[in-house]
Image (cartoon, helix red, strand yellow):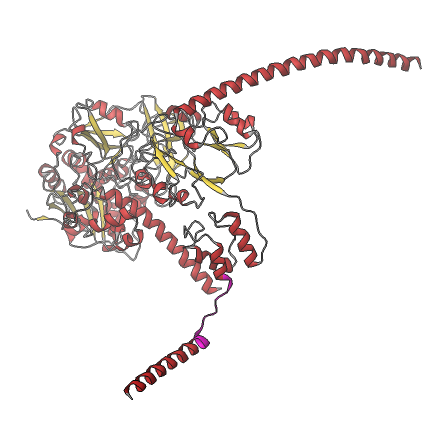
Amino acid sequence: MRRVTFSGGVHPEYNKNLASQAAITDAALPDQVVLPCSQHLGAPARPVVAKGDLVKVGQVVAESGGFVSVPIHATVSGKVVEVAGRLHPTGVIQPAVVIAADGKDEWVELDPIDQPLEADPDVLKERVRAAGVVGLGGATFPSHVKLSPPKNKPIDRVLLNGAECEPYLTADDRLMREEPERVVKGFRIVMRILGVSQGRLCIEDNKPEAMAAMQKAAAGIDGVEVVALATKYPQGGEKQLIQAVLGRQVPSGGLPMDCGVVVFNVGTCAAIHDAVYLGRPLVDRVCTVTGRAVAQPSNMRVRLGTPVASLLEQAGGTTKQAGKVILGGPMMGLTVPSLDVPVIKGTSGVLVQAADEVVEEPYRACIRCGMCVRVCPIGLTPNEMGSRAEMGHWEELDGLDVMDCIECGSCAYVCPAYRPLVQFFKLGKAQVRVLRQKRKEAEAEVLRAAKA
Amino acid sequence: MGFALSVLILVGLGASAAAGLALADRYFGVEEDPRLDALSDALPNANCGGCGYPGCRAYAQALLAGEDITLCAPGGNASVQRIAEILGTEAVAVVERVAIVKCAGTAAVTSNRAKYLGITDCAAANLVAGGPAECPDGCLGLGSCIAACEYDAIEIRNGVAVILPERCIGDGLCVKACPRHLIELVPKDRKVHVLCSNHQPGKEVRKICSVGCTGCKLCTKTSSSFTMDGDLAILGDEVDERAAEAALVCPTGTILDQNMFSARELVFDPEARRRLKERQAEYKKQQREAKKKAAAAKKAAEAKKAVETNEPADDADHKDEQKVTS
């Protein structure tokens, strides 16, 4: 089979074999869940329950806070203990709904849609929104927004993102191997809503079993094909995936819909399937618990809001002295300062690195070797950008297109001087945003003065 | 002959250039407000940018356009006076201000929840999982304020920045540099400060820091200058004479009285903390004795009153009797 790919990128140690042979198991029901109101990109949800309320699984506990937002559902049945600030996986305290489980696991009445492939696309779309589905690959962009492209941006292709290019993570791999029907059915709903006849299931070639299973599940469906991708990081980045599969480029500052494409992750499609075929809101997700410091690396179906500590316990605890706990993969994941943080919609994995795996080397000056330029999948100049950010020259940094950086970490991965390039760019982006805002205000001021 | 010719040519060139310059000055000359130079001179010309303008001359220009005359912190009252004279407006007394870091969380009293290995910059550290400090409003101690300060007026030890008021000129550059908004410009003659910025409930603060404000409100009971913002004591610009006493009642030693210690002593020196505890114990003893004395005095007064009231009571009785009889 022909393998497609993008330019740039790196080949980190994948370490997928740690967890790839562990079938998905159901994690134990947690005693207490913490559901942050901000589990997605966009406006945080507004809590609609109060302390002391009794809730059932699937009941809305927070309503969506705008168009780019989704509701949040109770993931256990029980009593609301508190609606207060709790530690969020990003490390800051954010409002959350805390529910103590009663252990009965009572569900609200579910309302499946009959014959969804003939149903009205708007009904399906509303169902996806009401079920709280967001991109489960990690970016957590509300799915119904992606399913509502403006009229002037026609969509002609839908891609299933089965690359799972982050090292260690195997949740999507297992999902495709064990429940390919669910994924493909969800994918067809997406095609139905967007009115697109051509879909591609894109899978990296280091997952042959997943590819075979998906091929079987998609056999006989018109317009749906499996595409093999070369194994390379960050193959699962939307822009890289589109470039590899369709040869199109997403314009700077734009979205995939600007070049007629929408990309959905494997887990997201499974969640869309549940929302439509079962009427079941997003209350759990498959999460890989792995790393060299985990006793039994595993893939678990976890109720959202379960504390990370409880997941690690169920994976047999940590073997060596754990060095660093990361939510997500090692390239783009977030290091967490405490094990009390909950699993949220975007938590694709919990990675525990052993202490000897953590690099504690201080960073040094750039030696201008240019390795970062060679691996940048966007075609930026991370060396130049890094030094601008170090010196605080935000204006120049903006000129080097820092806002197009996808923060994949390829540059920092290859840097022989251990420069924390992604951190520089995250800081730089924040500063450039402030700068642009100021510039905009100044321009508005000039215009006002000119009018007067 | 050749010599005379060259002299003539040079003189001619000179004359025509002079004429050109004179004409240019006459027709293309730009009128500059004569006050601009004077205003420029009245400012300190440190070009610190604290006023929000790129340099002193730019601020001078803005002054001519009617900008607020009190924006120059380093210039202080003297500058304002001269600016007012030049512009012919009324001088306003400005309060001279210095910066203070509202955190005393050294490694001795609070801790870090994670090891931070990234960029040595507070804003960058704050982006990584909300910063390595246990306290969400605590000083990160990475020195973004030091980098901003042009006067070497900030010192960091044990993870906390302290501003040296004798060096601070109050330009406010550090205030802008601090991503956690811990630095405030306060009147130079205000000696009492709350060295904490954590708004969390007291029980949370107690878990992570031994010198954080727990919201016990004892200071508000001592002096009306203190107000509560959630569980954090806040001081305004103006303080009454009892505010300094609050430093002696604050159970966590969060309140600094600069008549007793400098910020540097209280934050960096464990000996100062010990002495503060002693002073607080002494004050408590004094208060107790004063209370006892007051109680005794009250008792005495009451006893005396009782004696006194007994007598007039008799009188009253007599009066009543008189009334009745009359």
Q: Magenta includes A205?
A: no
Residue A450, how many percent across, how many down? 45, 64
Residue B230 location, x and y as percent?
Answer: 48, 31
Residue at the far right: name it. Answer: B326
Foreground residue, A386 or A218? A386
Asked if residue A298 shows in the view, the reply is: no
| Figure check: B273 above or below B96 | above
Q: Foreground: A308 or B157?
A: B157
| A253 left or right of B200 in image | left
Quarter of the rendering containing residue B107: top left
Task: Tally the marks.
Answer: 0
Residue shown at 18%/50% (left/top)? A242
**Percent x, y for residue B76?**
50, 47
Q: Quadrant of residue B115?
A: top left
Q: Residue furthest bottom?
A: B1
Residues shaded magenta: B25-35
Residue B115 in sight here: yes
- Residue A303, image x and y in percent? 27, 29
* Picture quadrant of residue A31: top left
